Image (spheres, rainbow, N blue to C red):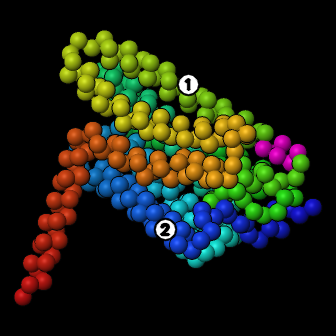
Amino acid sequence: MPNISSVSEFLLLAFADTRELQLLHFALFLGIYLAALLGNGLILSAVACHHRLHTPMYFFLLNLALLDLGSISTTLPKAMANALWDTRAISYQGCVAQVFLLVFLIGAEYSLLTVMAYDRYVAICKPLHYGSLVGSRACAQMAAAAWGSGFLNAVLHMATTVSLPLCQGNALDQFFCEIPQILKLSCSNAYLREVGALVFSISLVFGCFVFIVVSYVEIFRAVLRMPSEHGRHKAFSTCLPHLAVVSLYLSTATFAYLKPPSTSSSSLDLVVSFLYSVVPPAVNPLIYSMRNKELKEALRMLSQYSVFQRGTHLLHLIP
């Protein structure tokens, strides 16, 4: 009975068999990855450089951009390399690192989205107490709790998953390493070691989900009681991006892990995993910047400053 420690590499699922399609997938992945880097990088730069955006909401948005950059960088670069070099292999160490980082970053992102729901709740339902409830120290503590919960979740899963004995080879039905695919390779009943970590994850996910739902019920009740139409519109406009990101995140992840086994197939699993692991990090910057005037203004000023600096540099080069 081979143990997971004796496996030197895993074989990932390829998106295509023909060389032309592999190169096409590489180009598609590269475009998505560059778009995610650009979008999240612009948000990081805008929030860091503009003092008007040094508020709790944008502090959490900065953390979200960091997590999005990390999660998409965990999966896509290896998938692009495999498509470019026509290979399926990933080393044991690389697979372990991929699993750990993905569980850590996705768990931290979900916790952070819960914290952002609390921020919107306080801003709309308790505006007079916003400064005391969501001050700089409280923001730092809540962000640290979000990152810490993701890290703890990843450690618990890795402590059990890495020790599982494997009896079903080393081929994974996924384009990146994830725990459900490794469990498929484990020996009969060995996956029961995951029960403890799974209970913790389910409790965390369910608790965050209930908190988000309750927060938005209170938010909508408070908004509907506002006498001013302009006030209602402004309140909704600050909540819609977060609500859209939460909906996208939960819908794709829920379908990926809770779909009936009868509908499961390699191609469907591939598409669904792509939707929850790649699409949200690439789309989140667009969702948050579309209706946010302050962020749009900061990005415009950032681009103008960049053009001005480039022009000044070129003028210095002219003799």
Out of 85 and 220, give the one closest to the viewer. 85
**Is 193 one of the magenta-colored residues?**
yes
Q: Is residue 248 left or right of residue 148?
A: left
**Residue at numbered disc 1:** 210
What's drawn in magenta, residue-wise? 189-194
Residue for point 83% across, 53% down: 186
Q: Residue furthest left?
A: 319
> Split into 4 quadrants, where in the image is the N terminus?
bottom right
Out of 94 and 248, give the one closest to the viewer. 248
Disc nearer the start of the sequence (2/1): 2
> Split into 4 quadrants, where in the image is the C terminus?
bottom left
Q: Quadrant of residue 79?
A: bottom right
**Residue at numbered disc 2:** 24
Residue for point 40% across, 46% down: 284
Q: Residue 19: x percent and y percent?
A: 57, 74
Q: Is residue 318 visible?
A: yes
Residue for point 12% across, 83% down: 317
Q: For the residues marked 2 and 1, what is the alpha-carbon distance in whole angstroms? A: 41 Å
Q: Residue 178: x percent and y percent?
A: 67, 53
Q: Using the image, tell me which numbered label, if any, was put on residue 82.
A: none
